[in-house]
Amino acid sequence: MSGGGNTAYGRKRFQRSRAHFTDRITADGRDGWPVEAGRYRLVVSRACPWASRSLVSRRLLGLEDALSLAIADPIQDDRSWRFTLDAGDRDPVLGIRFLSEAYDLRETGYPGGVSVPAIVDVPSGRLVTNDYQRITLDLATEWTALHRDGAPDLYPKALRDEIDAAMADVYEDVNNGVYRAGFATGQARYEEAYTRLFRRLELLAERLAGQRYLVGDTITEADIRLFTTLVRFDAVYHGHFKCNRWKLTENRVLWAYVRDLYQTPGFGDTVDFDHIKRHYYQVHSGINPTGIVPLGPDLAGWAAPHHREELGGSPFGDGTPPGPVPEAERVPASGRP
């Protein structure tokens, strides 16, 4: 999710920017960035669904000690994502006030704005990548030497074609679809995005009515990518983005599916509903000029039984759940149900 220019949302045609910095951190270091414990810092906003993918993946794979975490303030200004949650308004590891400083060290005049997730090289302070589509796939496949014992295979080779196809549909109609609806500047564009979104959600509900996870019998990257949009649906997309044909809580299958994931260690323990709501309602002033943040929806239902285990499968297969959330990374009570 990019920083800067937020007042334009709802006033000009929306188009998702492609990642400009697409270097990869790999086991063999072929792009000049070898996997190395402690060398890199993952910068995220808990408000951003694209960044939240990396939060979930990092937790599931047990990379907390290998890849440190910086959490930006959910409220941006035109200087980009800022570290005002930290003492002195600076990231304690990188020593910078704004994520844009790491971008500027890498390149000047870069297109596409300052976005999260971003991975920064700690020794040089330079941005390595902001390729939100690739980062989590590489965490799953290139960082395996640093995975915890019992970590799940989030991108199994035998299922990659099916996972890729599911993720492509989810990206176009759901992940990006809510934004195309919410930031539409004309009725026709809004209705087209809205229609495609709910048609895809209905197809996903049909698929998930008979199987616990999107692909295979365990959680995969496909589930992570769908989860980060669904978990925000009633809190922001239903009202703020006018995706209001129905609430997620009104769809029996999808509501049970997302609760199942939310209650799985590594998913819900990364979600901060306070950050999510404050970011969308206060930053997108072109859509919500008053900046008023709604008090609802009621979050109590997230802990309700889902009964999805009756469909078979298990979240981690032969593996194990991740351990407790590190104390410094726990979501504050204000962001939890």
Image (spheres, rainbow, N blue to C red):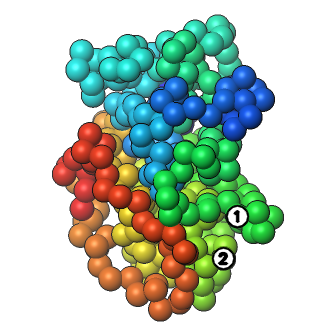
Residues packed near mark 2 inside 10 Å, few (<14), some (14 to 19) or many (20 plus):
some
Does residue 26 appear to the left or right of 40 in the view shown? right
Q: Residue at x 67, y 44 (%)?
A: 142
Answer with the quarter of the image where residue 46 lies.
Answer: top left
Which residue was labeled with disc 1?
156
Residue that lies at the very extreme toward the left in this rendered image: 333
Is 191 drawn above or below residue 212 in the view shown?
Answer: above
What amino acid is found at the position of numbered circle 2 in the picture? Answer: Gly
Separation of residues labelled 2 and 1 (CA atoms): 10 Å
Residue 58 is marked as none
Query: Judging from the image, what secondary structure is the residue with disc 1 in?
Result: loop
Answer with the quarter of the image where residue 291 lies.
Answer: top left
Mark in front: 2 vs 1? 1
Q: Residue at x 35, y 58 (%)?
A: 323
Residue that lies at the very extreme toward the right in this rendered image: 161
What amino acid is found at the position of numbered circle 1 in the picture? Answer: Pro
Does residue 137 appear to the left or right of 178 in the view shown? right
Q: Looking at the picture, how far across and down is residue 176, in whole percent?
A: 63, 50
Q: Residue at x 66, y 69 (%)?
A: 200
Residue 180, visible in the rendered structure: no
Is 57 drawn above or below residue 256 in the view shown?
Answer: above
Q: Earlier in the sequence, mark 2 or mark 1?
A: 1
Between 111 and 313, which is closer to the camera in this rendering? 313
Residue that lies at the very extreme toward the bottom in this rendered image: 310
Between 296 and 160, which is closer to the camera in this rendering? 160
Query: Judging from the image, what secondary structure is the residue with disc 2 in?
Result: loop
Residue 216 is marked as 2
Whether tag 2 and tag 1 are in contact, CB under 8 A, the answer is: yes
